[in-house]
Image: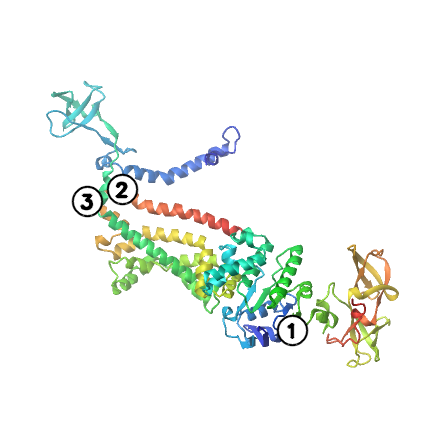
Amino acid sequence: MAEVELRGIVKDYGAVRVVHGVDLTIEDGTFCVFVGPSGCGKSTLLRMIAGLEDISGGELLIGGARVNDQRAAERGLAMVFQTYALYPHMSVRQNLAFGLENIRMPKAEIAARVSEAARMLQLEPYLDRRPRALSGGQRQRVAIGRAVVREPKVFLFDEPLSNLDAELRVSMRGEIAALHRRIGNTMIYVTHDQVEAMTMADKIVVLRDGRIEQAGAPIELYNRPANTFVAGFIGSPRMNFLPCTVTAREGEGVTLQDAQGRVLHAAVDGRTVADGEEVQLGIRPEHLHPDPEGYPVTVENVEQLGGESYLYARTETGIALTAHLSGQTTLARGSRTHLAIRPDFAHVFRKDTTALPRLRLGELENVM
Amino acid sequence: MLRFLTQRRGRDRLDMTDWIAFGFLGLGVFLMLGPVLWLTLSSFKTEAALQEYPPKLLPLAPQFVEVEGFETALQRFQVVSGEHAGRELAQVRRVGLNAQMVDPANPDERLNVHINDREAVRAVQVETENYTGLFTRFNFLRYFWNSTFITVVATVLTVLFNSMAAFALAKYRFTGRNTVFLLIIATLMIPPTVTLVPLFLVVSQMGLINSPWAVIWPAIATPTGVFLLRQYMLTIPDDLLDAARMDNASEWRVYWKIVLPLSAPALAVLIIFSVMWRWNEFLWPLIVLNRSEGFTLQLALNSFQGELQTAWSSLLAMTVLTLLPITLVFAFLQKFITQGIAQSGVK
């Protein structure tokens, strides 16, 4: 069992606190992704779990045992670094074997494990090359292989794909996900790329300024973001926000009014807000669609990708709205159109940025 | 190689810049190599040829001939002017400005020749006795061994200790790290002559006088080495060290298996420095090594130079032999330096 549990984990650099009491449980076998903007403390958190940074406060448990004071090597983890951190003076084979030689494993077993990992990651033709003779993707696979041979309890990945080009990144994403399915270990993966987080994770932990903003399954975060930060961070392009005022609350949801008096409905639980309270209405680009009844906007830019289109528009009050349309569009820059907001897709956030619970999920309507 | 050496700017004929470049390079070669060449050629001269004035470049030795009726061989001369011009004679003895000479073909007749009318007959003669004498008459191997032992042991220890200090200063964060580093660098400003006496007191208190360790121990901690290696180690990414730690490597293994191999180019530079320092060191060994069986080569060379008389032939031969090892070390390690630079260029 390799459940990872963080209890009130704190990290101070001198007088500066960069991680503020993180509580988190990562169940055994989970692929957990830490995501957040740069400087949010996600890499620091990972390095604390790895044992490469001291833990200033709180408790870290791996498999139920407190490991705060154990050295990195004793924790039974393996890590893949952003820079790959392959030993440049060793061949691929020596790179893979180094960790095993350090624990004085018998030579025959080292050879068996190395060739097994090389087979799994298709590294066999490169075993006697030096890292600098490999391409970025191959180096990445060696770095993963170096983690795999040690058969660790938990894999840690520190932005492993950020040095790769877009195409390779997609294929390596698939390989890492496949690796997780095959060996089923707990994996903790740090990235600033929400697409990586959405596609790979069993559980996403969104961090900001050393605090957890929200943790949960990717779709859960997408459907029910806890606050405007998570709502804006998960999903691409980011969610649109419209400042509104609450005018009425019924069992069906709340009625809102924007600055120009336009009336909007949202299917959210309005029990915790009062009439007249200022709120933000959130709507994802993919949930805006052209409709003569909708919100009048001026198109500022159009991106046609063939299979889908993005409209960058502005309302009369100057609020930017992004709309994602499936298929192609005849709308051009400068044209005027109407974009409709359906209540079942709307999110409402209080002034303190926290979300009101949604009553119905429009996203689940046409689920196949 | 030839193509490289003969490449020039002008297409068919030598350009102005070619003249300047080749001239400058030629001058450089002459200045650098000339003395060494002179030394090497002179080391094969006989003591007599060395004393000669004006000096000759090649090791030319006077020639002798056995003449009937004389017990010792007589020196051969070519008569260039005067009565006997054109004849080759052997000199019996010299009296004032005249030499009494004899024709080897007709040993009974004595001829008088003015000394300015004759020239000694010479031929290139390599005096290997200068070298063999070092082994038979002097204890060259003993001095060579002393120098080698001191150089090798001191270099190994220098590299080991300096690299450990550099590793700590480059890769560990601890309070006072910069202070320690600055203190080490600051010692560069103290001239070695200032520490000579206190160092001697320490070494003699420890009873090391006349032992090679008296030369080795004070030499191994060099601020230059620490500085050089630290600056190089700063360029090794921390991720590599962290990766090794995750790979169960102890701090010693991180140092030994990761940091040291990756610092190879800087280590090569330090090795060259250390070998040159120790091999050429003179003042300190002169003070602490007083018995001739403990002498290094430099001290032995010095001992050839007496107050009244200098054994030039032995001195020159030994100087050549002293230069050889360090030249070899340099030539060998230089390759490593360029290799190292080429390697670190490609990440």
Above or below for A357 versus B178: below
Q: Quadrant of residue A246?
A: bottom right
Percent across and percent down for residue B170 are 47, 62
Percent across and percent down for residue B247 are 50, 64
Q: Is label 2 or label 1 in front?
A: 1
**Identity, as a three-letter code, of the amino acid under mark 1:** Ile
x 62%, y 62%: residue: A176
> What separation in Å lies between label 2 and label 3 (alpha carbons)?
20 Å
Give the SS element for disc 2.
Answer: helix
Return the mark for residue A212: 1
x 86%, y 58%: residue: A335
Give the SS element for disc 3.
Answer: loop
Q: Earlier in the sequence, mark 2 or mark 3?
A: 3
Q: Quadrant of residue A18?
A: bottom right
Q: Quadrant of the C terminus of chain A?
A: bottom right
**What residue is disc 3 on?**
B308
Side of A46 where A283 appears, left or right: right
Same chain for the residues at labels 2 and 1, yes or no?
no
x 79%, y 58%: residue: A309
**Identity, as a three-letter code, of the amino acid under mark 3:** Leu
Return the mark for residue B317: 2
Percent across and percent down for residue B216 are 31, 58
Q: How many marks?
A: 3
